[in-house]
Image (spheres, rainbow, N blue to C red):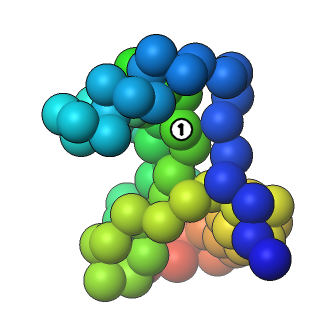
Amino acid sequence: MKSITYKKHSLKGRLLCAIFGHKFKTIKFITDHFKEFECRICYLQVTNEITDKKVSLTQEHREINRTLIRLYKKKDYQF
Ligand SMILES: [Zn+2]
């Protein structure tokens, strides 16, 4: 089962986000297309998929993103 990543636990923030929606800011640029985001209110961390849909930043996604960074730097891949 995939776990959802929160940098900090903010019950009040999670409640606000459940009502008003998340306020994401970019925390890491992976490639021109892939980025990691964090909610300014509840600190939920997500990444985007190829379809641009935001998904929870699991350990699996972190590893994929780290690999993408390495490939991108080595070969200057264009996505
Ligand atoms: Zn949030």
- Judged from the image, the quadrant occupied by ligand 1 is top left
Residue corresponding to mark 1: 44
Q: Quadrant of residue 56?
A: bottom right
Q: Quadrant of residue 75?
A: bottom right
Q: Is residue 30 left or right of residue 23?
A: right
Q: Residue at x 39, y 28 (%)?
A: 15
How far from the left and from the top, in percent, is residue 17? 32, 33
Provide the secondary structure element on which disc 1 rests: strand
How far from the left and from the top, in percent, is residue 57? 63, 56
Which quarter of the figure is the N terminus placed in?
bottom right
Which amino acid is tagged 1? Answer: Leu
The answer to which of 28 and 55 lies nearer the viewer is 55
How far from the left and from the top, in percent, is residue 36? 51, 48
26 lies above or below 59: above
The answer to which of 24 and 69 lies nearer the viewer is 24
Q: How many marks?
A: 1
How far from the left and from the top, in percent, is residue 55? 48, 66
Q: Disc 1, ligand 1: is the CB inside 8 Å?
A: yes
62 lies above or below 25: below
In this rendering, does residue 69 appear at all? no
